[in-house]
Structure formats: C-alpha cells, structure tokens
Image: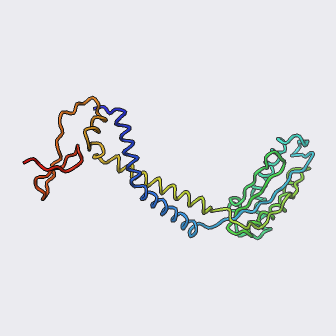
C-alpha cells in the first residue's frame, strides 16, 4: 500500500519525538566525547609554536641570466612574481643546508623544509617567513637565521636584487596548535551527531514503529481511504480476571458479566 503525505509527517514527528526522548543521553555522550577530546589534546598532542620574520623586496632593476628587468612601484604584479622567485630560492636544498649549518640544527633539509612556510603579503612586495617548531626558541632561531642568510643567497642568484628585513622573529609566547577550544567543540559535535544518529537508526529499523497504531483516529489519519468497521480490544492475560484493556479509550474496563 502506498504511503501518503500524512504518514510521512507522522513518521517525522515520531522520529523527532524519539530523538527528544533521548536528548539527555545524547547530551551526556556529547559531553563525554568533548572531555575525551580535551584530555587527548592535552596528553597526546605535542604543542607547536610559530615564529615569523618579514622581508621586503627592494629593487628598481635586476638581471636574471642575460635578461634585465625593470620594476616600478606601480608594477606590484611583477613584484609578486619576484617574491615567488625568492620563496623558491628559500625552499631550495642549498639554502636550507646553509640554514642548518649556521643554526646548528639536528635536521635534514627535507625535515626543515616541512617546518618552513613563506607567503607573499597581498598587494605588496613583502613576504613572511614562518617557522613551526615544538620549541618556541628554536622557531625564533630558525626564522632569524633564514632572515640573515636569504638576502645574501638571493643576491648570488639574482643580480641587482635587494632583500631587506622588515621584522625579525620573536620567541612566541603562545602555542599555535593544537587548539583546545576547537578540539573540544569538535568532540562535542561529533559525540552529539553520533549519539543522535544511533537513536535515529534504531528508530528506523524498529518495525514496531511502522505497525503499531494506538487509536482509530491515528489509523484514519494514516489511511484516510480506509473505513474503520470495528475495534478489537487488546485482551491482557493477568491475575485480574474480568478486566480488559481498551486501546481506543485508553483505560481498563470491567468485562460484562
């Protein structure tokens, strides 16, 4: 038999009711997941720190190989291209090995490369160099070592170029990751969604939710084309002989003698 819109609406109401009846359990599970997320972040995730140095590309003309170029102050797009070239030089193996040697770092250049990121400052000829490390002092040391080595390294490759330090890095006072707030809220949301999902799945696979009809009015609302001819009371076997339960009236009645 095809189900109509009335039945769909009633099913949605029942579904919402099933979730609402378990709302305290859902909240409890969400709180537990948030607690686990906070504890896991505190105990198992190592804090990381970021130190950033800022550099500025300053040149009116430069040569790359046999080609010479001229950059005016209005040609920011060309300057941005030059910044990208400098970032490429920064991330090269030779530059990173010079940084490792100067700072006395216990890393390979591939490991150091994963700790460094560089981003152009939008609309300018400047760029930031950010170093991420588990040690705040090490992050500051690496960032400032790069700031000192990179200008000379660039001048060896790009003739006529000039890179100046805008800001040296400082020792970060606060960790950059992980975020206790973010992980705790994420744990709460995941716990709540999982708990609600379990409630919904149990409701959907419970066949009784589809077949149990509690009254004639509910039967008529679900199947309006069907005429209710009679009601059969729900007979309950118990020690209280002579009683039966009426599903229609929702009360116990004395059986007629």
For image coordinates 24% across by 47% down, the residue present is: 250
Position of 41 compared to 134: left or right? Answer: left
For image coordinates 82% across by 61% down, the residue present is: 147
Between 180 and 247, the one lying in front of the other is 247
Q: Position of residue 255 (x, y in %)?
A: 11, 49
Q: Is residue 197 above or below residue 103?
A: above
Position of 132 compared to 222: left or right? Answer: right
| Labels in figure, total | 0
Position of 135 compared to 243: left or right? Answer: right
Position of 28 compared to 243: left or right? Answer: right
Residue 173 visible at all: yes
Q: How is the image coloured?
A: rainbow
* Among the 4 quarters of the image, the one containing residue 217: top left
Between 91 and 164, the one lying in front of the other is 164
Q: In this view, does 215 lie above or below 190?
A: above
Q: Where is residue 222 in the image (x, y as percent from the top left)?
A: 30, 35
- Specify the farthest residue to the left: 257
Q: Position of residue 184 (x, y in %)?
A: 56, 61
Between 63 and 204, the one lying in front of the other is 204
Between 74 and 161, the one lying in front of the other is 74
* Among the 4 quarters of the image, the one containing residue 136: bottom right
Q: Is residue 42 above or below residue 190?
A: below
- Specify the farthest residue to the top: 225
Residue 98 visible at all: no
Q: Quadrant of the N terminus?
A: top left
Q: Where is residue 202 in the image (x, y as percent from the top left)?
A: 35, 51
For image coordinates 12% across by 59% down, the residue present is: 239
């Amino acid at each position: 038999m095809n189900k109509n819109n009335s039945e769909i609406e009633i099913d949605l109401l029942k579904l919402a009711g099933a979730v609402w009846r378990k709302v305290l359990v859902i909240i409890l599970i969400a709180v537990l997941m948030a607690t686990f997320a906070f504890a896991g972040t505190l105990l198992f995730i190592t804090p990381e720190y970021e130190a950033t140095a800022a550099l500025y590309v300053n040149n009116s003309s430069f040569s790359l190989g046999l080609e010479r170029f001229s950059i005016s102050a209005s040609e920011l797009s060309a300057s941005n291209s030059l910044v990208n070239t400098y970032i490429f030089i920064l991330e090269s193996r030779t530059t990173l090995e010079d940084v490792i040697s100067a700072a006395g770092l216990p890393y390979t250049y591939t490991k150091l490369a994963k700790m460094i990121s560089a981003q152009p400052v939008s609309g300018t000829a400047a760029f930031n160099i950010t170093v991420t490390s588990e040690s705040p002092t090490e992050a500051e040391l690496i960032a400032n070592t790069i700031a000192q080595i990179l200008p000379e390294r660039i001048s060896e490759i790009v003739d006529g170029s000039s890179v100046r330090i805008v800001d040296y890095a400082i020792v970060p006072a606060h960790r950059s990751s992980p975020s206790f707030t973010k992980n705790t809220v994420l744990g709460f949301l995941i716990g709540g969604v999982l708990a609600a999902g379990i409630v919904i799945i149990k409701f959907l696979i419970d066949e009784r939710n589809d077949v149990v009809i509690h009254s004639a009015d509910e039967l008529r609302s679900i199947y309006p084309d069907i005429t209710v001819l009679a009601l059969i009371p729900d007979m309950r076997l118990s020690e209280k002989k002579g009683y039966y339960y009426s599903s229609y009236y929702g009360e116990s009645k004395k059986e007629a003698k």
